[in-house]
Image (cartoon, helix red, strand yellow):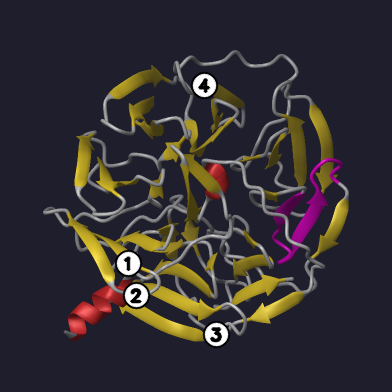
Amino acid sequence: MRLNRILIIEMLLLALSSGFQFAQGQTAVSIERATPQHTAIFQADPTVTGKIALESPKLFEMKRGTYQSWSGGYLTPKVPGFLSTGGSGIYFTGGDIFWPNIGVGFSDPLVSNDSIYFSLNIGDAHLFALDRQTGSVKWRSQREQGHYSPPLIVGDTLCIGADSGNFYAIDLKTAKEKWRHFRPDKSAVGHSPTSDGQRVYYVATNGTLYALDAGTGKLTWAIETQDEHVSSLALDGDGHIFFRTGRQLVSLETESGRRAWTVEIKQNIWLPLAVAHGLIYFRTWEGNIRTIDAKTGTLQPKPSNDDAQSGTRLAIDKERIYFVGKSRHRAFAIDASTRKVLWEFETYMDCTAPVVGGETVYIPCYDGRIYALNAATGKLRWRSSAKKPQLSSPTIASDGVYFISDDGRVYAIR
């Protein structure tokens, strides 16, 4: 019984701040995930002044030593308050990609109702649920030398993968397990799952994609790719799911798993994929932004005036694409159609990938602050009041901006 309770709690995690509504037929189902703008336009825009309004208790500690991150770099906490990569500069982990049992991985803090959820892999795997107003721990679970995926919430259900071969669905109201899907090879889940409201999709580290009925967990289809490094999954809201395997981008029909198209990409693709405006956006290793027609798989020609090169993943809204340049100390907004540079913002220090919500772009920087810019003009609205170096990407909720710091705490800017 105790083990069963631990398994139930172990998969309680999370959701994001997005409040993004994914219409499926005549029913709109709330989909919350750690990286909403990888697959959708994020519309929340809270009223924020830049003040740190919430500080959780110390939840974990980055021990001295070297950790391998999901990007292949090595994190060495040589400087208090920062993680550096073998002396080559400061590095922030952040994000949605975990490699099991080899090092460090963090989900973004996910906000749902009165709770904040996040998972992290740092030697052992940890799951947290915090009170949204006080930051106090509601519950905490640990897997020794284990692994948790970033989580997903679909309506009132939390979905999360583990390295035990299990993928769980937990009722958020009762904290009871609704269903589980078991993989006999006991592979882990390395990316955040995703959903269209009817089905939940995830990819295991054995290279197999699974589609499960969101209500029952019944297997709808499974696709073996024979590739242990399948990318995170992206949906278009029109019945298709996209991913990279090797140098190919693949589109599958969500209902049947049938392959819609495959396109060979000669350049090295920097992940994750972003889907908006009927296009799949990705950037090459060189920083060039390319697009593929989501319906046909046709690689679009590169606009002649697309001169800005991205050094981070992309944030996309209805009109613009945002990123930090290859120099890492200048942020850009370009027109999503023409690729014309609309504004630049000099940060004077290295920064990581922006997050866009409503009319505000949030940029985490290596001075430990988050900078909030007017999305249309690039003018500074505010910067966070205290230096708190971020491990996670910012999460935008209805009442503020949340992030995990490398001091082992969760903060909210309100």
| CA distance separating discs 2 and 1 | 6 Å
At label 3, counting other C-alpha atoms closer than 10 Å, the crowd grade (few under 14, some 14-19, many 20 or more) is few
Q: Nearer the viewer, mark 4 or mark 2?
A: 2
Callout 1 touching callout 4 (CB < 8 Å): no
Label 4 sits on what residue type? Answer: Ile
Residue designated by label 2 = 175
Residue at x 79% of width, y 73% of height: 51
Callout 2 touching callout 1 (CB < 8 Å): yes
Q: Earlier in the sequence, mark 2 or mark 1?
A: 1
Residue designated by label 3 = 58
- Magenta part of the chain: 360-378
Q: Element type at marker 2?
A: loop
**Residue 202 appears in the figure:** yes
Asked if 217 appears above or below 101 in the picture, the reply is: above
Q: Position of residue 322 (x, y in %)?
A: 70, 40
At label 1, counting other C-alpha atoms closer than 10 Å, the crowd grade (few under 14, some 14-19, many 20 or more) is many
Residue at x 41% of width, y 60% of height: 151
Residue 388 or residue 249, whichever sits in front: 249
Residue designated by label 4 = 292
| CA distance separating discs 2 and 3 | 25 Å
Q: Is residue 358 left or right of residue 406?
A: right
Give the residue furthest to the front: 26
Quarter occupied by residue 89: bottom right
Residue 411 or residue 83, whichever sits in front: 411
Label 2 sits on what residue type? Answer: Ala
Q: Element type at marker 4?
A: strand
Residue designated by label 1 = 170
